[in-house]
Amino acid sequence: MRRELIAGFLPEIYQVALRPGTPLAALLAVMEGLHMPTESRLDSLDAVLDPLRGEERFVFMLADWLGLAAYLDWTGGRPGAGVASFATGTERLRLLVAEAARLWRDRGLRQTLERFLTIATGIEGIQVEDGVAGADGRIRPFHLQVLLPAEARRYAPLVARIVAAERPAHATYSIRYADPSEDQEQHAEL
């Protein structure tokens, strides 16, 4: 707060006595200096709280607070031990944190799982299909097949954790990558 504004809160007798070089003017200058750091921080508070612009450590705290900690990797080998990282990078985590409210609102939908995986990996072309036929040719009820481009294979552990946690609770799933040379599938049955 500038000293002129502070002076406006003083009783009129003090305002009349306020002159440069007086102890009162020096006191107001000190008060202005004390308020400056707080005011500058408050002026940029939106940047501090915005996951797209905030400090990296704050983004990891927000991710934990929003229930995304299961998707973080820790140098200590377990949640909370060591330093956290996100397999696809902090910028992807920032986007995921920014979209978390929408993703949680529509949780359990095929489109939401596709969106979640696309944001987390940064790879387009992810598809989630239901009503997939099994090996015997019959439709497998309550089964999802997640189809990913071959480039997503490098994030396979992250993809597996996301699909296992974000799929509808009643559904089983399989994960397939577009690379036909290594037809790798992961399953989870209820």
Image (tube, rainbow, N blue to C red):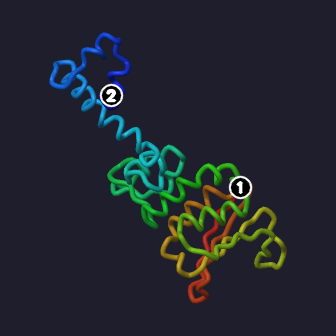
Q: Are marks 1 and 2 in contact (CB under 8 Å)?
A: no
Q: Residues within 10 Å of mark 1 (few under 14, many from 20)?
A: some
Q: Quadrant of residue 183?
A: bottom right
Q: Secondary structure at mark 1?
A: loop
Residue 51 position (above or below residue 136): above
Of the two numbered discs 1 and 2 on the same chain, state the one appearing first in sequence. 2
Residue type at the position of mark 2: Glu
Position in image of residue 26 (x %, y %): 18, 24
Residue 9 is marked as: none
Residue at left 32%, top 51%? 82
Q: Residues within 10 Å of mark 2 (few under 14, many from 20)?
A: few
Position in image of residue 170 (x %, y %): 74, 54
User: In this figure, which residue is indicated by the disc labeled 2?
Assistant: 4
Name the foreground residue: 120 vs 167: 120
Q: Secondary structure at mark 2?
A: helix
Decide if residue 52 is on the left or right side of residue 184: left
Residue 167 position (above or below residue 36): below
Residue 18 position (above or below residue 88): above
Quadrant placement of the N terminus:
top left
Q: Quadrant of residue 98?
A: bottom right
Name the foreground residue: 140 vs 85: 85
Residue type at the position of mark 1: Gly
User: In this figure, which residue is indicated by the disc labeled 1?
Assistant: 108
Residue at left 57%, top 65%? 119
